[in-house]
Image (tube, rainbow, N blue to C red):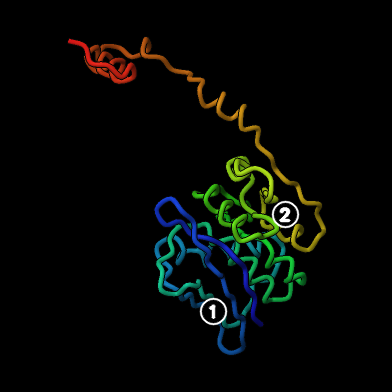
Amino acid sequence: MLASVLSSAIARVDAFPVEVEVDIGGGTPAFRMVGLAEGAVREAYDRMKSAIRNSGYDFPSSKITINLAPADTRKEGSAFDLPMALGILSAGGFIEKRDRLGRYLVLGELALDGRIKGIKGALPSAILARSRRMDGIVLPRENASEASVIGEGLAVIGVETLQEAIEFFEELRQPETNGTDIRALFEAAGRYNVDFSEVKGQEQAKRALEVALRGAITC
C-alpha cells in the first residue's frame, strides 16, 4: 500500500518541499530509502522502528520502500523521522484519514520512546506551508513558537509524541494551535543576563566591542 506525506528541507535560508512516499509491499522483509538521503536521514530506520513499537503499534514485517522527492536533491537532518513514521503507519493501515494527512506539512525528530525532539528550520518551513496554502504545519512542540512568528493564515500544531501526532490526524485529539506575541518575543530577545562587567580582564577586547557598538572610531 502507498502513502504520501509532505515535509521540507532547508537550502541556505529557504525551505523547499519534500514529498515522503512510502510503499509497503509483499516479499522478503526489507527496508530501502531512495532520493539522495544523507547522514541522519539514513539512520532514521532504527529510530522509527523503536518509536513506532514503543508507541503501541506493530512495525510492518514487509518490504518497505521510502522515496524522498525530488530525487535529485540531497536531504540531510533528522526532521524526516516523523513524516516517514506517519507514512509507514498510514501505508500500514493505522492512519485512515489520508486526505487529512496530506493537508499538513510535517517535521520532527523521533526519540526511541516515541517522543518528538526539536528540529532546525521551523520558521522557513512554516513560510513554505503557508505559501502552498496548506491547512497547517505539524512539528515538535518546542518549535511551535518559532513557527508561529509568521502570524495568521497557518495552523501551527505542536506535538510532543508520535502518539499525539497520530491522534491529531485521526481527529481523536483537538488541534492545539500555537500563537506568538511578537512584541514580547523581541522584548525578551533584548534582555541579557550577562554584562561586560562580569568579564575579568580583556580590557582591549571589551573596549573594541564598545567602540564597534557605538559605530565610531576613537583614538
Any mark on residue 86, and which?
Answer: none
Figure quadrant of residue 90 = bottom right
Left or right of 173: which side holds 102? left
Q: Is residue 114 above or below residue 72?
A: above
Left or right of 115: which side holds 93? right
Q: Earlier in the sequence, mark 2 or mark 1?
A: 1
Residue 36 at x, y = what percent? 41, 71
For label 2, the SS is helix
Q: Residue at x 43, y 60 (%)?
A: 76
Q: Is residue 49 visible?
A: no
Any mark on residue 65, and which?
Answer: 1
Residue 71 at x, y = what percent? 45, 74
Q: Is residue 26 visible?
A: yes
For this rendering, which residue is in front, 36 or 70?
A: 70
For label 1, the SS is strand
Q: Residue at x 62, y 73 (%)?
A: 4
The N terminus is located in which quarter? bottom right
Q: Residue at x 64, y 45 (%)?
A: 141
Any mark on residue 164, and which?
Answer: 2
For this rendering, which residue is in front, 22 or 6?
A: 6
Q: Amino acid at mark 1?
A: Thr
Q: Residue at x 54, y 79 (%)?
A: 65
Q: Is residue 147 above or below residue 101?
A: above
Residue 122 at x, y = what percent? 55, 49
The C terminus is located in which quarter? top left
Label 1: few (<14), some (14–19) or many (≥20) C-alpha neighbours in 10 Å: some
Residue 80 at x, y = what percent? 53, 61
C-alpha separation, residue under disc 2 versus residue under disc 1: 25 Å
Q: How many marks overall? A: 2
Residue farthest toward the bottom in the current orientation of the protein: 27
Q: Amino acid at mark 2?
A: Glu
For this rendering, which residue is in front, 115 or 140?
A: 140
